[in-house]
Image (tube, rainbow, N blue to C red):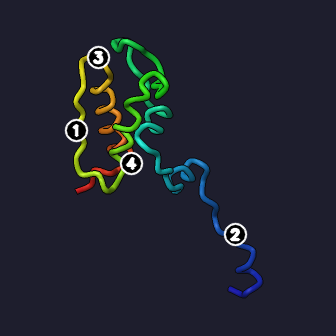
């Protein structure tokens, strides 16, 4: 094949459906992830999209999970303050970002 005929071939481009796979995920904190992706079910007291404005005291607890220097998080709470939902946000964020690798 001559140089001239070789230049006519173009390198195939990446299909649009694969571009999201190759893009790097943004590092979101747990509270940011919850506001972006979490939807509370009808069984919850407040159903619909998660909002940190409703429970601002959970933001610091959830974001402590993202701090690499934090080894343990203690959360002393009363009932019906969103502690279980915060823990669900932490667990699902870790699964979503592949942070639970062995």
Q: Residue at x 41, y 35 (%)?
A: 59
Q: Which residue is mark 2?
A: 10
Tell me the CA gap for discs 3 and 4.
28 Å
Q: Decide which of 18, 27 is in the foreground and name it.
A: 27
Q: CA distance from mark 2 to mark 1?
A: 58 Å
**Mark sitting earlier along the chain (3/4):** 3
Decide: is 12 above or below 53.
below
For disc 3, the marked residue is: 80
Quarter placement of the C terminus = bottom left
Q: Position of residue 57 (x, y in %)?
A: 39, 29
| Front-lying residue, 80 or 9 | 80
Between residue 17 and residue 29, name the one nearer to us. Answer: 29
Between circles 2 and 1, the one closer to the viewer is 1
Question: Percent position (x, y) of residue 21?
Answer: 50, 52
Q: How many marks?
A: 4
Q: Which residue is mark 1?
A: 74
Which image quadrant for residue 68?
A: bottom left
Residues at marks 4 and 1, CA–CA distance in whole angstroms: 23 Å
Instruction: Say whether disc 4 or disc 2 marks the residue closer to the N-terminus.
Output: 2
Q: Does residue 100 lie above or below 87 as drawn?
A: below
In the orientation shown, which residue stands out farthest toward the bottom? 2
Instruction: Kindly state the secondary structure of the residue where label 2 is placed.
Output: loop
- Residue for point 43% across, 44% down: 29
Report the mark closest to the observer, 4 or 1: 1
Disc 4: which residue: 97
Decide if residue 14 is on the left or right side of residue 81.
right
Please, what secondary structure does the residue beneath circle 1 have? loop
């Amino acid at each position: 094949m001559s140089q001239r005929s070789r230049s006519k071939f173009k390198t195939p481009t990446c299909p649009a459906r694969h571009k999201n796979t190759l893009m790097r995920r943004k590092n979101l904190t747990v509270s940011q992830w919850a506001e972006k992706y979490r939807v509370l079910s009808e069984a919850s007291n407040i159903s619909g999209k998660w909002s940190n404005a409703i429970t601002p005291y959970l933001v610091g607890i959830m974001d402590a999970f993202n701090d690499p220097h934090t080894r343990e998080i203690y959360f002393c709470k009363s009932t019906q303050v969103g502690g279980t939902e915060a823990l669900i946000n932490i667990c699902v964020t870790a699964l979503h970002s592949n942070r639970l690798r062995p």
